[in-house]
Image (cartoon, grey):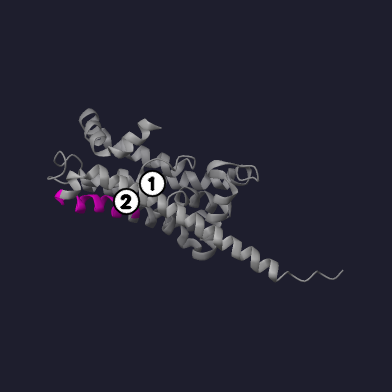
Amino acid sequence: MSEFLDFVLHLDKHMNRLVVEYGTQIYWILALTLFVETGLVITPFLPGDSLLFTAGLFTRSDGPEGELLNVWILLTVLPIACILGDMVNYKLGQFLGHRLFTETSKGIFHKNNLAKTRSYFERHGAKTIVIARFVPIVRALAPFVAGMEGMTFQKFVPLSIVANFLWVWVCVGAGNIFGRIQFVREHFEMILLGLLVLMAISVWLEIRREARHQAHAKATEAANPEPAQAD
């Protein structure tokens, strides 16, 4: 766990090492990482947002080690990898969803995660596929639940394309834009740690909000029971 945390908090140093060691193959490494994060459902802990932000930082000629990555390759290859991952995720939900989400399931397949993702679909409809891309945990489950709940593949794919191009372009673009600020370059580790804390807080707030929403729904249902059906 400590090694994983070290990797996440020092992405800038590891990115530099990977580029030096693997050259242009770094694009495939980044693409594979994002494909696994989006496609395998059980790997939402991979550093998607921070990885893209760091990659954007290395597209600047005045970045930590100069321009090591081509921004246009990132903005083309990485969304495609995420879209393919979403498609795998969708198909897994379509064929395995009801077997994996049970009353005794734990971890990512805990019934509370399913309820939260379903709640997103109830409130936002198909737009959930786009919105969820920016919400940790939910983004790993949204394609899965879409396949599980019967959203057609023809409807899912265009939404996935929009969501993933938007997500990658925003995160890489943020790294590229903020990378010009000297304070960001000099305090990158602290800023990245701050981003991770903000993500954790957002997940915690979302869990609390969803718990209140479900409690309110149960209270309303209890206060207004459906009349018994006449025989």
The circle on residue 154 is none
4 is within the stretch colored magenta: no
Q: Position of residue 167 (x, y in %)?
A: 34, 53
Choose between 106 and 168: the one closer to the eye.
106
Determine the residue positioned at 53% across, 59% down. Answer: 210
Going by the numbered disc 2, the residue's amino acid type is Val
Q: Indicate left or right for 215 with 208 as reference.
A: right
Residues shaded magenta: 167-182
Q: Position of residue 68 (x, y in %)?
A: 18, 39
172 is within the stretch colored magenta: yes
Q: Indicate left or right for 86 with 174 as reference.
A: right
Q: Position of residue 158 (x, y in %)?
A: 42, 57
Marks 1,2: beta carbons within 8 A: yes
Q: Would you say residue 151 is visible in this rendering?
A: no
Specify few, some or many for label 1: CA neighbours under 10 Å numbering under 14, 14-19, or 20 or more: many
Q: Position of residue 28 (x, y in %)?
A: 31, 36
What residue is shown with label 2?
Answer: 168
Residues under labels 1 and 2: Cα distance? 9 Å
Specify few, some or many for label 2: CA neighbours under 10 Å numbering under 14, 14-19, or 20 or more: many
> SS of the residue at dot 2?
helix
Going by the numbered disc 1, the residue's amino acid type is Cys
Determine the residue positioned at 32% across, 34% down. Answer: 6
Q: Indicate left or right for 204 with 106 as reference.
A: left
Determine the residue positioned at 23% across, 35% down. Answer: 13
Residue 18 vertical placement versus 222 (above, below): above
Q: Earlier in the sequence, mark 1 or mark 2?
A: 1
Choose between 5 and 70: the one closer to the eye.
5
Residue 5 vertical placement versus 53 (above, below): above
What residue is shown with label 1?
Answer: 82
Image quadrant occupied by the N terminus: top left
Q: Would you say residue 62 is visible in this rendering?
A: yes
